[in-house]
Image: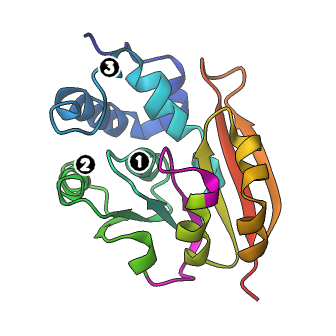
Amino acid sequence: MTVETEPDAAAALFGDRIDLARAFTANLAAQGEERGLIGPLELPRLWTRHVLNSAIAAPLFHGSAADIGSGAGLPGVVLAIARPDVTWALIEPMERRVTWLTEQVDELGLSNVTVIRARAEEVVPKQFDVVTARAVSALRTLLPWTAPLVRDGGELALLKGQNASAEIEAAAKQLKKYRLSDVRVDVLGEGVLAETTRVVRAKVRVV
């Protein structure tokens, strides 16, 4: 299958970092399926469904951020390219994915990124301003992994699919347990991207 042609929106989203985004996307296209990072049907929609779907969320991050279950680097590597002013931790338990992430960080010269081989529950809690994840698990399962890592007053920004609102309803018990407030779904990219991105956002109050 052929790789999707770079959409016009890419240059606008990445600005002067577009060459890094192109290099990462090319690496993912060349090696992703072979290394078990993306499925065989993803090349024709690699930019639209994965790279730009991640990049559109870049304005939501500040300070220190973590991507839980970073896998192929979606959204972590993409966001680190788009937001070099944010300090990123890419947290991933699988060795082969950690190897891939480390290779990409080194090759692209992403000095704002640390790759951590660990499960989320093994990471020191309450240390990040914003925590994200994409295509990891249902919200009720994801919250116990992500919310404890956020500083008091920090935020979750979790990239989800079209069932985001239903996932919030199903996670009512976890939302209460982890003292999450201002829980909502933001739809990003309307009028800009061919496919919008849904982000479940919530404030974290530890005390």
From the top left corner, tell me how far across and down residue 105 is, in percent: 26, 55
Marks 3/1: CA–CA distance = 20 Å
Q: Are marks 1 and 2 in contact (CB under 8 Å)?
A: yes
How many labels sit on residues?
Answer: 3
Residue 20 picture location, percent across and down: 32, 39
> Residue tagged by mark 1?
81
Q: Residue 108 carries which label?
A: 2
Side (left or right) of 57 relative to 103: right
Q: Residue at x 40, y 57 (%)?
A: 69
Give the mark toward the camera: 2 or 3: 3
The residue positioned 22% from the left and 38% from the top of the image is 36
Mark 1 belongs to which amino acid?
Ile
- In the image, what residue type sits under mark 2? Leu
Against 206, is 110 above or below? Answer: above
Give me the disc on residue 43: 3
Reply yes or no: does residue 29 show up in magenta.
no
Alpha-carbon distance for marks 1 and 2? Answer: 9 Å
Instruction: Specify the segment rendered in magenta.
Output: 124-140
Q: Quadrant location of residue 202?
A: bottom right
Q: Is mark 3 on a helix, strand or loop?
A: helix
Tell me how far mark 2 sits from mark 3, CA to CA: 21 Å
Q: Residues within 10 Å of mark 2 (few under 14, many from 20)?
A: some
User: Element type at marker 2?
Assistant: helix
Eye-nearest disc, 3 or 1: 3
Looking at the picture, tell me which residue is in the foreground, 98 or 15. 98
Q: Quadrant of residue 156?
A: bottom right
Q: Is tag 1's residue or tag 2's residue first in the polypeptide sequence?
A: 1
Task: List x then y, in percent, for residue 160.
Answer: 61, 42
